[in-house]
Amino acid sequence: MKARASFFGLAFLAVLVAWTWFAVWRLSSANARHDENLADLDALISARAELEASVLAARAGILQNFDAINRSVRSLRAASGLASSLRSQGREYAPAADIVDHEADTVKNEEAVIERFKTNLALLRLASRSFPGAADALSYCDDARVPTAADAGVSTAVPDAGTNGAPAPCERLARKVALLRTDVEVYVDSPRREVAERSEHDIQALEELQSELDPARQGQVGALLGHARAILDHRPRVDLIARDLVTSTGRADGRAAFEEFERVARHDSAMEAALRIAAAELLALFVLLLGALVWRTRWR
Amino acid sequence: MTPSSLAAALRLAFVAVVANACERPAPPARAREDVAASTPTPGPWGGPTVSPEQAVLPLPPAPKVDRQRAKLGARLFSDKSISADKSVACATCHPLDRGGADGLSHSRGVGGAETALNTPTIYNATYNFRFNWNGQFPSLQAEFDAPVTKTMKTSWLAIRDKLEADPTYRAAFAAAYPDGVSEANVKDALARYIDTLVTPNAPFDQYLNGDLDALNVQERRGYESFVELGCSTCHQGANIGGNLFQRIGVMRDYFRERVENGGPQVGPSDDGRFTVTKNPADRHVFRVPSLRNVALTPPYFHDGSAPTLEHAVKTMARVQLGRTLSPEQVDSIVAFLETLTGTVEPGP
């Protein structure tokens, strides 16, 4: 009777050991993906950090190409796939998956903003590069050599250059160009509203003068004004977009998802460890009981 | 075995089990390409180094791809039988012996129907950040839908059926993909093949990598003009373009000039990115094309209206930069652009 009870006890213990090991096996195979998921989440955080650094470097003029920005965007696009992967691992991973999903939405919305940033920054760079040359070309003109619109027969309303005490068109042009140049350069350095308004005023003054000039100079002034407007227009826009991108919730989302995932993963790891200990203890108990039973049967 | 040694063995087993369970995962390694991107590349000739921050970068070598899949993609790429009337393959509009573009202002698909826009080169397309002139597609796989339905006048279902019916394709797909023929696998095979269609080691790449003799004086002057004039603000990065959107006609109205010069009236195909975003600010905004192998791929622009490089350079200078270039400047920039013709990598 006692032997039968011992036998059933041992069998029960064996089943318990097997069940515990099975639970350990299931948990450990799920936990094996943790490294991969953590690496993916870490890559997401790195991509976000790289995007922010690239945007700032591009805005500062250190980064002259947009390949790094595009690389980051491509990496961030992986967020939606990662969210699905996390969600497939169980209910407890849903909060982390939700945060990653939110980041995926942020990235989706930001892509259009990033495109606007690149386009506007390219235009700002182009204008900033061309503006000084265009201003230079108009700053050193000679009324004696440059025909006015009146000479070219475009308009008869233009006063003769320097005949009635008024400055010749070229001289006035050079002065107005110098004013515009100063104001635009101050604006580039420090984009304040009053400087922008002053620059707009300079632009209007040049537009008024434009009709008095010969067609070639009109074209040059047109180009100069185009560059000036581009600087006034794109400078604040680019800064605003850059600020929005670097203060985006993306990085915080990435970190929050990482921490949430790590919390759940740590819980699962602890559970796996506890089950391993329990399994080992049960196994030990099984071996001891088996040993005792064998010893008792042999020496009785 | 004595009870004490059994206990010692069990204790050891406990420690091993617990240690195994509590092992912390190693921090994930940073992707190699990220490290490469942030490290200046020394020139192999000991010349100047390439900074990853500069506007124009040398083309990296082709990405590593699964050769079996790329080989399958190569076969699909030139297979006319997948189009509706078996007359058009991907290679029809992207002939590889002509720089990856067919030389027509508008390509012809099934039934001779013209494409709305000029066909860009397929070479180095893998380095583009978005695909199609209006940047509608974020990946090559997504882009394939357009030529399949519009140019080949077929569907993925029909293509899958045709490939399933061909035992050689069936076997090739079974060998390359666990799930055999499927739309996703056809797209993947084509994308893997296109990944191999890169043209590194152009004379300009050699120059950037430190071989100062790779460009002659005129070509170097052309490069200087290219940068000084501001062309490189848009045509930049490793692909010298293909990585941002820009309006055509920044300084002058390109479309008015086109009409004045006897070109076609402005139509929906000129809307550019507007067709995707419906944002009026995106009208006439296009993906900046790559200038790699540009000398091999006339005519130019989204409408194929510029028959020569000289024409294209003059027009771009006028409408994008507000400049009229001297003949010497045009010649030197064209000479520089001709140095962007790279070496075709051997097939998969």
Image: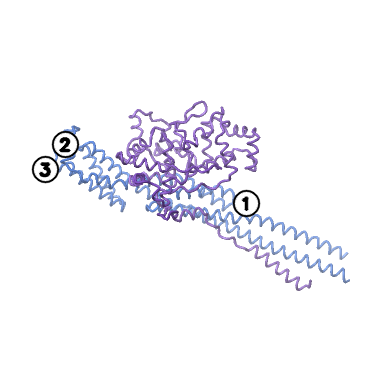
Disc nearer the start of the sequence (1/3): 1
Quickly name the residue at label 3: A165
Q: Amino acid at mark 2?
A: Val
Instruction: Name the tint of chain B in the rendering.
Output: purple
Q: Secondary structure beneath disc 1?
A: loop
Image point (47%, 43%), residue name: B343
Quickly name the residue at label 2: A158
- Chain at tag 3: A
- Chain at tag 1: A
Q: From this viewpoint, which residue is outermost toward the top?
A: B111
Chain coloured blue here? A
> In which quadrant of the rendered image does the N terminus of chain B lie?
bottom right
For residue B123, the mark is: none
For residue A89, the mark is: 1
Q: Amino acid at mark 3?
A: Gly
Q: Secondary structure beneath disc 2?
A: loop
Disc nearer the start of the sequence (3/2): 2
The answer to which of B98 and B243 lies nearer the viewer is: B98
Position of B273 with respect to A77 (left or right) is: left
Image point (56%, 50%), residue name: A82
Position of A13 with respect to B154 (left or right) is: right
Image point (21%, 40%), residue name: A209
User: Where residue B25 sits: x, y (%)?
Assistant: 59, 60
Disc nearer the start of the sequence (1/2): 1
Of circles 1 and 3, the one toward us is 3
On whether disc 3 and disc 2 are found on a single subunit, the reply is: yes
Q: Residues within 10 Å of mark 3 (few under 14, many from 20)?
A: few
Residue B207 seen by the camera: yes
- Chain at tag 2: A
Residue A106 seen by the camera: no
